[in-house]
Image (cartoon, rainbow, N blue to C red):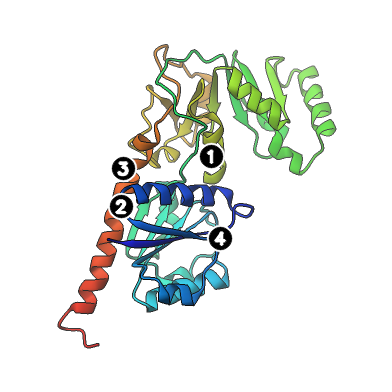
Amino acid sequence: MNNVLIYCRKRNIEPIAEQTATLLQEQLQQLGLAVDLTHSLNVPRLIVNSYQTVHMVVENLPLNLNEALHLAVCKTLGKSTVLSVLNSDQRIGKNYLTYIKPDAFSVSQTNHLKFYRYITGNKFIFSAFPQAQSSSKKSSIQCEAFLIPLQGKLEEAIEFKTEKTIYFDGRKLLQKFNSSQLRKKWAEMINTQKISTQSHLILSENKLNQLIADEALAVVLADPSLSHTEFTEWLNKCLNRKNLILLNEYQATGFSYFWSSGHNCLVLPAESWIKDLQFLDIPADISATTYKPANLFEPSINELSRLYSKLWHQKTSLLTSGSVKL
């Protein structure tokens, strides 16, 4: 039986990574694996405990010095090492990973692989695990409005032309402006007819949660600038409710067996999602985006379990090979 140690940073630092690591531990234990979860790494623990695999789940690179050191120690001790990075972009320096060389490396969606071309070995897709409040039965949906998160400025709302009601989530803008400034500017945009009176600005967490709970919404998450952890935070809020998720084709490569455009979601092109949204015709028989944990997680968990076994078999085969002198 493969003994696994999963490492993630603390919840107050990387909450989605911890959420994913916790759910991963639960699912692997259901398969019969012995799995420990930790927020801290120390060499004695790695030596004393018989872990075959150490799996690090982080939201962002770079690894800190302690994390990089312990990854290197794990390899020295003959343990299999897996590194999963949830958010990726071309600005982060990653060349040091060629020296640490984890045995397996994952990103959350396929277009992120291009940032790690120099990493050899096993590479795979591993997305953050969402955590909805409860399971829900499959049901059809008639969307009453769009819900769209704003990323950097209020003027983004001007690009959207549709006759439907649109709620714009502006909470992220509160990092730069106060609510009175944003509301004043929003009113000016309506008065000058830059946006329609059907457009509404949401700045309150409570109001947003109430809206998601009460209305049938088409939640538009297809913006490529949305990080994977932000995308997962939205899934936490919107799955298993009266909501339809709209995502782009790269986001859909995580849990690719689950997303079915036209059935339980709509997949838009990442390059032209705003334009496509203007002419979007939502099928009348489409279902709200719901899931059962077993159906969503099981294929990824089975694949990961096979990877653990494969990596450990490679390690033990090397150590027992007649060509290797110990």
Determine which residue is flagged by label 4.
92
Determine which residue is flagged by label 3.
299
Q: Nearer the viewer, mark 2 or mark 3?
A: 2
Label 3 vs 1, first from the N-terminus:
1
Can residue 99 be seen from the camera position used here?
Answer: no
Under circle 3, the secondary element is: helix
Looking at the rendered structure, the kind of residue marked 3 is Pro
CA gap, disc 2 to disc 4? 37 Å
Looking at the rendered structure, the kind of residue marked 4 is Ile
Q: Nearer the viewer, mark 1 or mark 2?
A: 2
Can residue 122 be seen from the camera position used here?
Answer: yes
CA gap, disc 3 to disc 1? 20 Å
Under circle 4, the secondary element is: loop
Please tell me which residue is depicted at 36% across the width and 34% down the height of the picture: 258
Q: Nearer the viewer, mark 4 or mark 3?
A: 3
Q: Nearer the viewer, mark 2 or mark 4?
A: 2
Determine which residue is flagged by label 2.
32
- Between 31 and 78, which is closer to the camera in this rendering? 31
Determine which residue is flagged by label 1.
231
Please tell me which residue is depicted at 36% across the width and 28% down the height of the picture: 260
Q: Is residue 61 above or below residue 182?
A: below
